[in-house]
Image (tube, rainbow, N blue to C red):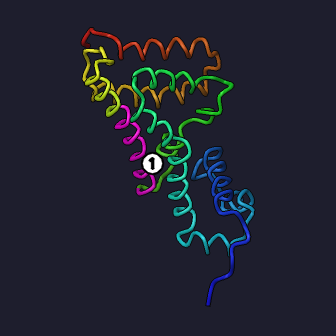
């Protein structure tokens, strides 16, 4: 016998849950907050997410990657100049008119807020993947001759991950876009510097 058909849009409900996690944080997002935002009752929730809130967060992580990062990773893998693509992306993060990067990093926020070790590790693993994407792109750029820095792609990739985490936090306290651009220009200049630190 088939189960009851879903009477809600599962993807839309998941996106609504992501908004709650992004705004309130995992620990502060109550069951009531999530159910209200998702527009579903407890029965439908536990039918879709038998593992409860932790399972919902796990699925949220995958969806955030698919919707907010995978496109950028594809660009890094296929563009002729990954260095310029990385610079453009960071400047997009601080543009007030851009929908990108206006709520902090979903994964960085989670690492700081979540107490559950398994979920914290899951969020941290996504940050590692962001760093790896930077490193892999810079390795290709080095091979193609478009990366002129004397630093290794591995060190630069870690630097960019550090910048990724830092700029998301700094944006929350510094609203002057001109100042944020200068910070980014200073940090991204390492991609062009021939001086080994």
Q: Residue at x 38, y 42 (%)?
A: 129
Residue 14: give x, y in percent of width and height.
Answer: 63, 57
- The residue positioned 51% from the left and 52% from the top of the image is 61
23 up-or-down from 97: above or below: below
**Is 179 above or below relative to 54?**
above
Name the residue that disc number 1 marks: 123
Q: Nearer the viewer, residue 17 or 10?
A: 10
Identify which residue is drawn at 37% across, 36% down.
Answer: 133
Residue interval drawn in magenta: 118-134
Residue 196 is left or right of residue 69, and the answer is left
Residue 76 point in image, percent of width and height: 42, 32
In this view, the residue in front, 127 or 114, is: 127
Q: Mark 1: which secondary structure? A: helix
Does the segment drawn in magenta span residue 95?
no
- Where does the image place residue 179, in percent across and percent down from the top left? 57, 12
Q: Residue at x 65, y 48 (%)?
A: 19
Assign the magenta stretch its main secondary structure: helix
Tell me the quadrant of the picture where the C terminus can be found: top left
Image-based side of 151 in relation to 171, left or right:
left
Q: Does residue 6 sit above or below 88 in this rendering?
A: below
């Amino acid at each position: 016998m088939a189960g009851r058909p879903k009477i809600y849009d599962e993807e839309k409900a998941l996106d609504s849950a992501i908004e709650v996690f992004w705004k309130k944080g995992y620990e502060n997002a109550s069951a009531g907050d999530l159910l209200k935002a998702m527009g579903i009752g407890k029965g439908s929730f536990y039918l879709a997410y038998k593992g409860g809130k932790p399972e919902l967060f796990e699925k949220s992580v995958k969806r955030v990657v698919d919707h907010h990062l995978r496109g950028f990773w594809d660009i890094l893998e296929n563009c002729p100049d990954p260095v310029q693509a990385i610079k453009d992306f960071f400047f997009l993060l601080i543009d007030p008119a851009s929908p990108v990067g206006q709520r902090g990093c979903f994964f960085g926020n989670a690492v700081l807020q979540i107490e559950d070790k398994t979920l914290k590790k899951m969020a941290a693993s996504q940050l590692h993947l962001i760093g790896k994407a930077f490193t892999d792109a810079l390795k290709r750029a080095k091979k193609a001759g478009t990366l002129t820095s004397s630093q290794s792609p591995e060190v630069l990739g870690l630097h960019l991950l550090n910048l990724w985490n830092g700029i998301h936090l700094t944006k929350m306290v510094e609203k002057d876009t001109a100042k944020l651009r200068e910070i980014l220009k200073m940090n991204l200049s390492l991609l062009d510097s021939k001086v080994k630190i």
